[in-house]
C-alpha cells in the first residue's frame, strides 16, 4: 500500500456522497492512511469517517472552519495527540459566491477569500508547525482551472484559487529543504454539488470548452491527490496539475 502507517488531515471532506474531499478521504484510506476529516458540518464529516471505517480504514471527524486559525491549530493538535504525527494535509475546503465584479458585495468577496485562500494559509501554517519538527510532510492544495484562466462572475473565486497556486509555490520554496513538499491540483468541471447547481445551458457551454467533452469525477481528482500525497511524486514540489479534460491548455 502506498500510504501504509501515514496520517492525513483533509479539510472540507464532509460532503457526504459527492464531494471531492470525501473521495480523497476514501482513496487515501484505501492505501493505508489514517484520516482526520474536518468540516463545517460535523454530522456530514462523521458520515464520511464512518464510510472510511466501514471500508476497513481508520478515521475520525472534527468540526470547525478553516477561516479560523485556532480551529486549524486544534485539528492538528488532536491528530498529533491521537496518532503521533501528521504526514499529509489536503486543503480541500472551498466555496463559491458568484457575481459580476460591479455587483459583487464586500461580503461575497471576503467570504470566498477567507475560506479559499486564508483557510489554506491557516491550515498550512498549523500543519507546518508539526511537519517542520518532523522534517517531513506533504501538502496538497485544491486550486482550480479558474485560478489559471479567470472566469466571468467568479472574480472572488478565481482570485482565491490563483492565490492558492502562488501560496503553494511559496510553501514549496520555503520548506523544501525541510523535507516538506507542497503541490496543487487545478480541477476543471467535476461532477459535485458545486457543478450540479449549474443550468443545462451553462453545462453545455462548459462542455464546448472541454476537449474531452465530459465532466470529471471526484475520483479523477482523488487519484491525483493520492499521487501527490505518496512517494510516487517524491521529487515533485510547487507544481500545479490540471484535472480538467484538457480545458486549460
Ligand atoms: P463541496 O462539495 O462544496 O465541498 C466543500 C466542502 O467544504 C463542504 O463540505 C463545505 O461544507 C466545506 N467547507 C466550506 N467552507 C468551509 C470552512 N470554512 N471550513 C471547513 N469546511 C468548509 O465542494 P467540491 O465540489 O467537492 O470542491 C472541493 C474543492 O475543489 C473546493 O476547494 C473547490 O473549490 C475545488 N474545485 C471544485 C471543482 C468542481 O467542479 N466541483 C472545480 C475546481 C475546484 P458545507 O457543505 O457545510 O458548506
Image (cartoon, grey):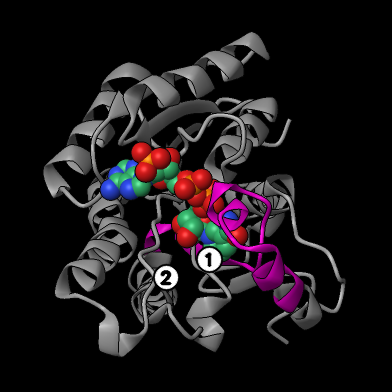
In this view of the protein, can residue 174 be seen by the observer? yes
In this view of the protein, can residue 11 be seen by the observer? no
Q: Position of residue 159 (x, y in %)?
A: 37, 80
The residue beneath circle 1 is 184
The span shown in magenta is: 177-205
- Marks 2 and 1, how far apart at CA: 7 Å
Tell me if residue 128 comes above or below residue 34 in the rendering.
below
Where disc 2 sits, the SS reads helix
The residue beneath circle 2 is 168
Q: Position of residue 208 (x, y in %)?
A: 80, 80
Earlier along the polypeptide chain: callout 2 or callout 1? 2
Q: Position of residue 220 (x, y in %)?
A: 74, 52
Q: Is residue 184 magenta?
A: yes
In the picture, the quarter occupied by the C terminus is bottom right
Q: Position of residue 110 (x, y in %)?
A: 19, 68
Q: Is mark 2 within 8 Å of ligand 1?
A: no
Amino acid at each position: 500500500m502506498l500510504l501504509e502507517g501515514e496520517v492525513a488531515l483533509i479539510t472540507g471532506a464532509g460532503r457526504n456522497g459527492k464531494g471531492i474531499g470525501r473521495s480523497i478521504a476514501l482513496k487515501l484510506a484505501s492505501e493505508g492512511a489514517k484520516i482526520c476529516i474536518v468540516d463545517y458540518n460535523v454530522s456530514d464529516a462523521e458520515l464520511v469517517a464512518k464510510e472510511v471505517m466501514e471500508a476497513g480504514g481508520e478515521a475520525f471527524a472534527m468540526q470547525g472552519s478553516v477561516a479560523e486559525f485556532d480551529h486549524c491549530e486544534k485539528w492538528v493538535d488532536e491528530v498529533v495527540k491521537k496518532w503521533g504525527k501528521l504526514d499529509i494535509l489536503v486543503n480541500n475546503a472551498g466555496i463559491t459566491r458568484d457575481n459580476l465584479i460591479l455587483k459583487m458585495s464586500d461580503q461575497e468577496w471576503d467570504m470566498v477569500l477567507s475560506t479559499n485562500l486564508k483557510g489554506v494559509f491557516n491550515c498550512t501554517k498549523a500543519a507546518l508547525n508539526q511537519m517542520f519538527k518532523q522534517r517531513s510532510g506533504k501538502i496538497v492544495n485544491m486550486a482550480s482551472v479558474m485560478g489559471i484562466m479567470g472566469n466571468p462572475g467568479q472574480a472572488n473565486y478565481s482570485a482565491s484559487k490563483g492565490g492558492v497556486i502562488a501560496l503553494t509555490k511559496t510553501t514549496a520554496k520555503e520548506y523544501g529543504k525541510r523535507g516538506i513538499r507542497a503541490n496543487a491540483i487545478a480541477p476543471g468541471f467535476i461532477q459535485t454539488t458545486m457543478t450540479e447547481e449549474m443550468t443545462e445551458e451553462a453545462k453545455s457551454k462548459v462542455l464546448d470548452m472541454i476537449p474531452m467533452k465530459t465532466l470529471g469525477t471526484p475520483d479523477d481528482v482523488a487519484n491525483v491527490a493520492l499521487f501527490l500525497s505518496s512517494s510516487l511524486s517524491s521529487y515533485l514540489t510547487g507544481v500545479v496539475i490540471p484535472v480538467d479534460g484538457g480545458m486549460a491548455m
